[in-house]
Amino acid sequence: MPANLPPQYYVLEREFKAERDTAEKLRLAKELLRMMPKHKGTDKLQAEMKAKISKLTKLLASGGQKGGGGGAARTEQPDHVEREGAGQVIIIGPPNSGKSSLLDCFTNAHPIVAEFPYSTREPQPGMMSFQSIQIQLVDTPPISPDLFETYLLGIIRNADLICLVAGLNDDDFVERLDFLVDKLKQRRIVLVGKEREVEEGGLSPSDVGVAYKKTIIAAHKIDDDSRLPRMEKLREIYPDFDIIRSSILDDESLENLQQGIYQGLNIIRVFTKTVGHDPDFKDPIILKPGASVDEAAFALHKDFARKLKFAKVWGEGKHDGQRVQKTFILNDGDIIEFHI
Ligand SMILES: Nc1nc2c(ncn2[C@@H]2O[C@H](COP(=O)(O)OP(=O)(O)OP(=O)(O)O)[C@@H](O)[C@H]2O)c(=O)[nH]1
Ligand SMILES: [Mg+2]
């Protein structure tokens, strides 16, 4: 029986064969297995791919020697950063653009900040407090023609939001950003300004395996207005992106960037209260816009959602303590009292 593999399979297979990074090779192998039609004609192919996956998994666990025999052994592949808080934001950018400085300003982490480029060698997370929530920021090594840590691909794919830091003090900032954006595109990660909605009928074949990652751009190191023309240039080149002016010397700009990150995450906060008590403003439920009372209850516990009879809601555009049903749509900042 013929295997009848989709054309996209062969494209991906070529990339799989050429890939030298163990973690990325493993991811591609899993993707290939997923793409394989499951019938008698692909039984042998499936078994072979499963064997490759198993081999690559073992290789990765044992230190992830780079494939092809040419690369140096890596003792650890930091290709995953444990998610914490209301959202995970990966800070990426060209060398020396100010990524670590932003992590340093926004969190209690103490990254290496240096005048010279390539000072960050591995991903470093930190938690940023913003309006009653904690957002996880992850600083990363730079991406440039001289350095591209392929494990970043997994980290970027996994992110809720990308914050791309453009150092506008650098005369070559356009070329450096273009390089980074193209490099990721070659590896099937497309940075986008707006969350991409899948059109009716699902993904097109060329979309298979492509990650569209919502991104905001920090137009960084704008310490004074003299660099504003560079920011305008950035706007011309990346018209669909939210571009936020920032400088570590300007607190207001840093607050704007925090706000931009929060908005970029596209989440809402819903505060809970119990009958007869004040609302808990410390630990809101984090939901996607358009979420219902039922989904808020489910986020607390699935049994809770099952037992829920109705809720009372306080917030903009509502009567205080308005009684609502499970399907009621919540807004950012609403207070909810569940009745079971
Ligand atoms: N003038 C100015 N300098 C800044 C600003 N932000 C960072 N810097 C300086 O830029 C240099 C590089 O900052 P880092 O935060 O280490 O840059 P990075 O992007 O993490 O660099 P790599 O990890 O090497 O890629 C340091 O000397 C910082 O003090 C800013 O807003 N204005
Ligand atoms: Mg750094």
Image (spheres, rainbow, N blue to C red):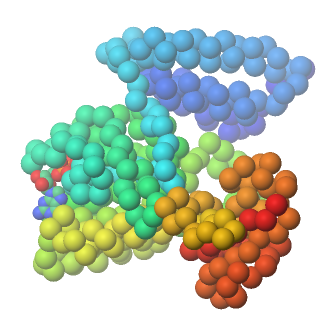
Of residue 180 and residue 56, the one placed in the foreground of this image is 56
The quarter of the image that holds ligand 1 is bottom left
Relative vertical location of residue 41 with respect to residue 324 in this rendering, above or below: above
Q: Position of residue 99 (x, y in %)?
A: 26, 52
Relative vertical location of residue 178 with respect to residue 315 in this rendering, above or below: above
Relative vertical location of residue 104 with respect to residue 119 in this rendering, above or below: below
Q: How many marks?
A: 0
Relative vertical location of residue 91 with respect to residue 21 in this rendering, above or below: below
Q: Look at 33% across and 73% down and name the residue there.
A: 256
The answer to whether residue 234 of the structure is visible from this angle is no
Q: Quadrant of the C terminus?
A: bottom right
Most extreme residue toward the front is 276
Q: Quadrant of the N terminus?
A: top right
Q: Quadrant of residue 227?
A: bottom left
Q: Position of residue 248 (x, y in %)?
A: 18, 64
The answer to whether residue 86 of the structure is visible from this angle is yes
Q: Quadrant of residue 249?
A: bottom left
Most extreme residue toward the left is 115
Of residue 319 and residue 8, the one placed in the foreground of this image is 319
Q: Along the horizontal axis of the image, is 13 left or right of 71? A: right
Q: Position of residue 133 (x, y in %)?
A: 46, 60
Q: Look at 79% across and 76% down and name the residue there.
A: 324
Q: Along the horizontal axis of the image, is 102 left or right of 225? A: right
Q: Quadrant of residue 97?
A: bottom left
Q: Look at 54% across and 31% down and name the residue there.
A: 15
Q: Position of residue 275 (x, y in %)?
A: 69, 68
